[in-house]
């Protein structure tokens, strides 16, 4: 499975958005091998975008087996892949829920590349003890999820927007939400609420920032084959999960999300703002 996931993220459609060349993007939560952040960073890199990658500085002892097997180095490995795609990379350990860390991220991006043109808020709280009925949900778990998924995205978006306004050249902010914001499944109260709030934040920011030429959208992934989903099981269990929930009968790979993000950042997405766009194989509808 490891080699398959590596191959999927390395699939290249070459340069199809040349107008992005030389711009700078911050992609948060981009350090996992099987993830959404890594493909987003790589697809933007293929378009010539300078990439600032952030991660939490995970303890390698806690890496999943496939990352240990290939000697994965979190955001440093992704930075190497970005450079291999012909773009420049800066890897930063940063906590999106810490205002000081967020400020440092933007400052270091400016010091290295001179501008911040794109922000992809992808960092998210790990699945954990929050996946329980609301009557059993501890307050600290609720706050942990909201702090990363919603407050962290607000802090990053606020800091990036301020810089984009100063630059006076517009920009694009993409918040990675989830179809859970629409479906509100049982035992996901904190997660679904954080993502629904992120959709509302995206629209409000889009209305405020439109006069500055800054577009803000939320992308809602459906069921994506990532390390976050490993606790659901694989093999026949995974396939049954897919068959019963996704009309197209296949999970996303992360590249589907990457293509949507790159499209929204490009001139092809220049008239799209304030939207929450599901990429989910037909799972949700609104």
Image (spheres, grey):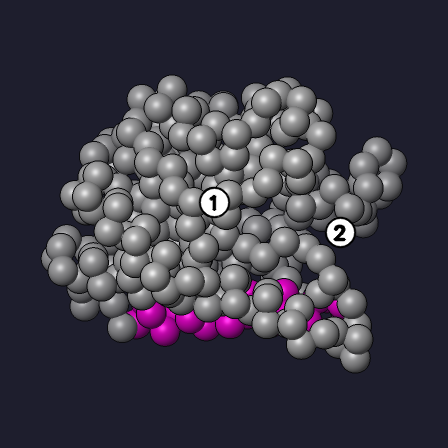
Q: Is residue 118 left or right of residue 285?
A: left
The 10 Å Cα crowd at callout 2, few under 14, some 14 to 19, many 20 or more, is some
User: Can you tell which quarter of the image residue 239 is in?
Assistant: top right
- The x and y percentages for residue 229 are 71, 45
Name the residue beneath numbered marker 2: 245
Q: In this view, does 136 lie to the left or right of 147?
A: right
Disc ID at residue 78: none
- Indicate whether residue 202 is drawn in magenta: yes
**Which SS class for mark 1?**
strand
- The x and y percentages for residue 43 are 41, 33
Q: What stretch is highlighted in magenta?
A: 185-207
Q: Nearer the viewer, residue 192 or 153?
A: 153
Q: Which of 68 and 223 is in front in this view?
A: 68
- Location of the C terminus by quadrant is bottom right
Residue at 49 percent of width and 23 percent of height? 11
Residue at 42 percent of width and 50 percent of height? 94
Q: Which of 244 and 187 is in front in this view?
A: 187
Q: In this view, does 257 lie to the left or right of 17?
A: right
Instruction: Give the main secondary structure of the magenta stretch.
Output: helix
Q: Please say whether residue 32 is visible from this viewpoint.
A: yes
Name the residue beneath numbered marker 1: 55
User: Can you tell which quarter of the image residue 165 is in?
Assistant: bottom left
């Amino acid at each position: 499975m490891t080699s398959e996931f590596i191959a999927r993220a390395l699939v290249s459609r070459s340069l199809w958005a040349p107008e992005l060349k030389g711009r700078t993007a911050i992609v948060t939560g981009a350090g996992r091998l099987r993830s959404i952040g890594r493909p987003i960073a790589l697809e933007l890199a293929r378009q010539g975008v300078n990439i600032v990658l952030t991660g939490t500085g995970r303890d390698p002892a806690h890496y999943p087996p496939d990352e240990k097997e290939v000697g994965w180095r979190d955001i440093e490995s992704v930075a190497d892949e970005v450079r291999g795609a012909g773009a420049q990379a800066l890897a930063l350990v940063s906590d999106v829920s810490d205002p000081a860390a967020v400020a440092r991220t933007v400052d270091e991006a400016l010091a290295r590349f001179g501008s911040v043109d794109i922000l992809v808020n992808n960092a998210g709280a790990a699945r954990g003890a929050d996946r329980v009925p609301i009557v059993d949900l501890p307050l600290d778990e609720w706050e942990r999820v909201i702090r990363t998924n919603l407050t962290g995205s607000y802090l990053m978006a606020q800091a990036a927007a301020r810089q984009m306004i100063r630059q006076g050249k517009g920009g694009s902010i993409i918040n990675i939400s989830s179809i859970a914001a629409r479906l509100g499944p049982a035992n996901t109260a904190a997660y679904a609420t954080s993502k629904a709030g992120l959709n509302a934040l995206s629209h409000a920011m889009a209305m405020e920032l439109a006069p500055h030429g800054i577009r803000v959208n939320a992308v809602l992934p459906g069921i994506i084959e990532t390390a976050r989903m490993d606790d659901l099981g694989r093999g026949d269990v995974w396939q049954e999960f897919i068959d019963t929930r996704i009309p197209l009968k296949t999970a996303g790979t992360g590249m589907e999300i990457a293509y949507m993000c790159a499209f929204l950042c490009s001139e092809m997405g220049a008239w799209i703002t304030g939207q929450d766009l599901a990429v989910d194989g037909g799972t949700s509808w609104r």
